[in-house]
Amino acid sequence: GAIGVDINADHLAVTEIDRFGNPVSYLTIDLPLYGKSSGQRKTLIGDAVKRTVGLALEKGKPIVIENLDFEKKKESLKNGSSWSNSKHNKKYARMLSSFAYGFIVQDLKARAFDVGIEVLSVNPAYSSVIGQDKFSDQYKISRHHSAALVIARRVLRLSERLPRQLRVTLPASIEKNGRHVWRLWVDVLQAER
């Protein structure tokens, strides 16, 4: 099994899975970082990371996170991309500036290393969409915990195929042989919009 962690601006969503990819437990660790001083953010992050690593140590499972690059997103916001001027995206820009993703990952890896827990990074492609559409209703969990579930399952190389009930609601042209499963999830995302 594994411990999947979905890192968000205001909390960590942690989902433990067994070796078959089934969820075992869920944990939400609040991280109210916005408006806090650097020292306060470091303390809050340290406490959250300590709880996450403690769970992994107790369960004897590796921690799995997404390999995200917020620096590119921050740079596009600084360069004044056209979408960065809306009210919604200014809020997103503030979140990115106060969001200490790099520090969370760095602290998580350091603390886990100290106690002998492995931290693995996986491709973040469509983890939120897959979690929401495939696991959220099935297990009655939040979209963040379902994303953490997908993250943990991805390191075990478990299936991300479209569920049958979702396939029947999409146009037949979407199910094309030879396409990578993530391409099908792109079609699902576009159909939802």
Image (cartoon, rainbow, N blue to C red):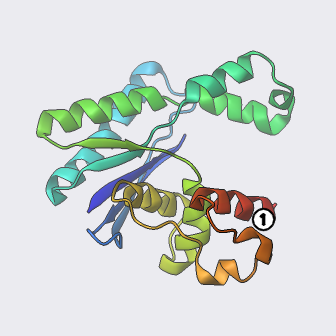
Looking at this view, is 129 or 90 the one in front? 129
The residue furthest left is 115
Look at the picture and state if 180 lies above or below 24.
above
Crowdedness near tag 1: few (<14), some (14–19) or many (≥20) residues, C-alpha within 10 Å = few
Looking at this view, is 41 or 13 the one in front? 13
Which residue is drawn at the image coordinates 38% and 34% (left, top)?
45
Look at the picture and state if 121 lies above or below 177.
above
Look at the picture and state if 152 lies above or below 167.
above
The residue furthest top is 79
User: Residue 86 appears at what percent x and percent y?
Assistant: 86, 33
Looking at this view, is 124 or 99 the one in front? 124
Name the quarter where the N terminus is drawn. bottom left
The residue furthest front is 178
- Whether residue 102 sits left or right of residue 130 in the image: it is left
Looking at this view, is 99 or 62 the one in front? 62
- Whether residue 89 sits left or right of residue 47 in the image: it is right
Which residue is drawn at the image coordinates 15% and 56% (left, top)?
60
Residue that mark 1 sits on: 192
- Whether residue 13 sits left or right of residue 178 in the image: it is left
Which residue is drawn at the image coordinates 78% and 59% (left, top)?
190
Label tally: 1
User: Residue 84 appears at what percent x and percent y?
Assistant: 80, 28
For numbered disc 1, what is the local secondary structure?
Answer: helix
Look at the picture and state if 59 lies above or below 52.
below
Quadrant of the image occupied by residue 78: top right
Which residue is drawn at the image coordinates 45% and 20% (left, top)?
38
User: Residue 118 appears at what percent x and percent y?
Assistant: 22, 42
User: Residue 31 appears at what percent x and percent y?
Assistant: 46, 42
Quadrant of the image occupied by residue 122: top left
Quadrant of the image occupied by residue 193: bottom right
Which three-letter amino acid code belongs to the residue tagged 1?
Answer: Glu
